[in-house]
Every structure is written in C-alpha cells, then in structure tokens.
C-alpha cells in the first residue's frame, strides 16, 4: 500500500518497529524510512507564505477542498469522532499540538480547528517534488529544514501567522508518526517556543482509539479514532521565555496524559520516557545521496 507516493510497511511490521523503539526507550524515532527520492530540500529560497494573487486563489481553493473533504475522508480512513470544541471558544491565535498517530490526523485537526487559518508543521521529507507536494504546499504546510537560513524564514513565517487574524499553527511535537499508538510520547520544544515567543496559548489535541462500533462494524476492522480538544494553556507573564517553554510543554503533556488516563482507565507508562533524536533507521538522506541512487 502507498500513501503520498511512499510504500507503507505492513501494519504488523510497523507495530513491530514500535515495540523495538519502546524497548530502547526511543519514543521519537521514525518507524518507517521515507522515500528520499520524493523529498524536495527546503532551502533559503523556500516560500513559507506564498505570495501573489494566483497563489492566493490556489491556496483558498485547496484549503476549502481540504476542509470540505476532511470529515468525509476521515470517516472512511481513520474515524470521525470529535469532542471538546467548546474549549476553543474565545481562542483566536494559537499553537495546536497533537499526538501523531495516523497519516490523516492533520485532516482531523483541520476539522477540529474550524474557524482558524491553520498551517501545519511537517518534516522536510513531506515536502515532496510531486503534484501532491504542490497541493500540500498550497494547503499550508510549513516544512522543517536542516538549513539555518530556511529555519530563520520558518520562524518568521510562524510568527507572522500567529499575529494575523485567527492564524494558528499545528505542531506534532512527538516528531514522528506511530500508527495507532495510544500513549502520549515526549515532546520537542519547538511548538512551545513559538507559543512563548508570540504570547499565544497552546491547545493540546489528543486522539484516542476505540474498536469499531455501530455501523462502523460493517465497514472497518481496525481501531477508529476520536479527536479531543483539551483546555488551552496560556503563557504566564511572570515567567521568562525559557520558563514558559518548559511550563507550556509540561502542562500540555500533562493534559494529554490525563486524557489518556480518563479514556483508557489506566496510567500512561511515561516515567522513563524522554525525548531523543537517536534513530532506529540510520540510512538518512545524506547516506541516500552518497549511495548514488538518486535517479532510481
């Protein structure tokens, strides 16, 4: 099976790799290597905020299409349960953070964050040199980069969004996508740095899973998703930026853990979890380039 042009590992193999990562205490690694041939490098020339009249029209059309298809598409492919939208009342600009557990969890977030002009932070390998990549860029992805100049532009674009009317940014602070994983995983600081720098709240989103029920039993065998919007967390005026980053990160993680405990009826096993950049799969993009297989 392919998703976004990338051949997906069988479900059983994905889950096996997750177990390997857990056993190593590595809760943030990729459990499937991307197809590096599809990645378009993000450099200092990348346009995070697309300029020009035609680009603006394309962005409006694609965003509208994404939103129109989000709920229907999610029902077919992941689940369509949404709870907690009342927690978004009065929230204008915000940094949303979500556990990363499905290729389409970003589409669930688009529906949940209806009314917000949402931009989505993605890994650089999701910036693809394909038609789909063009569609995703027009739809508002903000790819990360290893290029220092590009990341300065990334930061400036995030800051600009968080100071425009109802502009918001979605981060997946766990870094990697672990399909159908239930527990919260440790967070990177980037999302919380953006919130502290721009003095906007962090709104945790958390996806929980349940067995198919009702009519879903007729169509689906795998677990179904329900997204929950949790209470917004506001930076504290009396704290320094560094202190606010830690406060927002820890409170958002705590809210996700509380949601997990309330829903599943058990404590999350996070006592030994810590953020790490160590990868199970070591090949990486530079090794791919060195292999001489760029034209494959």
Image (cartoon, grey):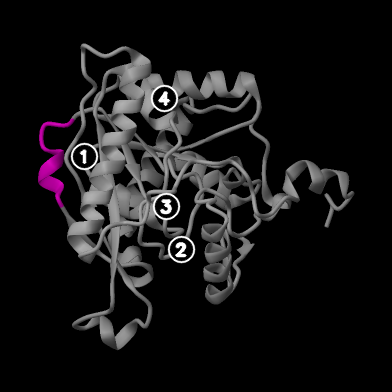
Q: From the viewer's perspective, is the residue at label 3 or at label 4 nearer?
A: 3
Quadrant of residue 6 within the rendered picture: bottom right
Badge 4 element: helix
Image quarter where the N terminus lies is bottom right
Badge 2 element: loop
The answer to which of marks 2 and 4 sits earlier in the sequence is 4
Q: From the viewer's perspective, is the residue at label 1 or at label 4 nearer?
A: 4
The answer to which of marks 3 and 4 sits earlier in the sequence is 3
Q: Is residue 87 magenta?
A: yes
Badge 1 element: loop
> Residue 91 at what x, y percent from top left?
17, 31
- Among all residues in the image, which is located at the extreme right? 292
The answer to which of marks 2 and 1 sits earlier in the sequence is 1
Q: Disc 3 designates what residue?
A: 100
Residue 118 position (above or below residue 83): above
Q: Disc 4 designates what residue?
A: 158
Is residue 148 visible in the rendered image? The answer is yes
Q: CA distance from mark 1 to mark 4?
A: 18 Å
Start-end of magenta stretch: 84-91
Q: Is residue 174 left or right of residue 287?
A: left
Q: Disc 2 designates what residue?
A: 179
Q: From the viewer's perspective, is the residue at label 2 or at label 1 nearer?
A: 2
Q: CA distance from mark 3 to mark 1?
A: 22 Å
> Residue 30 at what x, y percent from top left?
58, 53
The answer to which of marks 1 and 4 sits earlier in the sequence is 1
Q: CA distance from mark 2 to mark 1?
A: 28 Å
The tag on residue 115 is: 1
């Amino acid at each position: 099976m392919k998703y976004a042009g990338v051949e997906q590992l069988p479900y059983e193999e994905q889950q096996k790799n997750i177990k390997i990562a857990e056993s190593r205490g590595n809760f943030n690694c990729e459990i499937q290597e991307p197809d590096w041939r599809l990645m378009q490098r993000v450099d200092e020339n990348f346009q995070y905020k697309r300029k020009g009249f035609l680009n603006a029209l394309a962005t409006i059309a694609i965003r509208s299409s994404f939103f129109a298809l989000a709920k229907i598409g999610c029902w077919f492919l992941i689940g369509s349960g949404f709870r907690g939208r009342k927690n978004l009342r009065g929230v204008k600009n915000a940094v949303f953070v979500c556990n990363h557990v499905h290729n389409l969890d970003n589409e669930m977030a688009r529906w949940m964050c209806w009314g917000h002009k949402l931009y989505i932070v993605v890994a650089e390998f999701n910036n693809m040199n394909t038609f789909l990549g063009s569609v995703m860029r027009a739809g508002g992805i903000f790819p990360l980069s290893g290029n220092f100049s590009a990341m300065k532009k990334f930061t400036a674009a995030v800051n600009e969004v968080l100071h425009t009317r109802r502009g918001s940014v979605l981060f997946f602070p766990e870094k990697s996508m672990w399909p159908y994983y239930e527990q919260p995983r440790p967070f990177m600081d980037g999302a919380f740095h953006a919130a502290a720098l721009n003095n906007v709240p962090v709104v945790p989103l958390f996806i929980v899973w349940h067995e198919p029920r009702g009519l879903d039993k007729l169509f689906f065998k795998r677990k179904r998703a329900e997204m929950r919007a949790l209470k917004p967390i506001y930076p504290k005026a009396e704290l320094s930026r560094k202190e606010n980053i830690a406060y927002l990160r820890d409170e958002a993680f705590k809210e996700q853990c509380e949601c997990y405990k309330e829903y599943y009826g058990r404590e999350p096993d996070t006592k030994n979890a810590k953020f790490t950049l160590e990868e199970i799969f070591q090949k990486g993009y530079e090794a791919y380039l060195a292999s001489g297989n760029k034209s494959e």
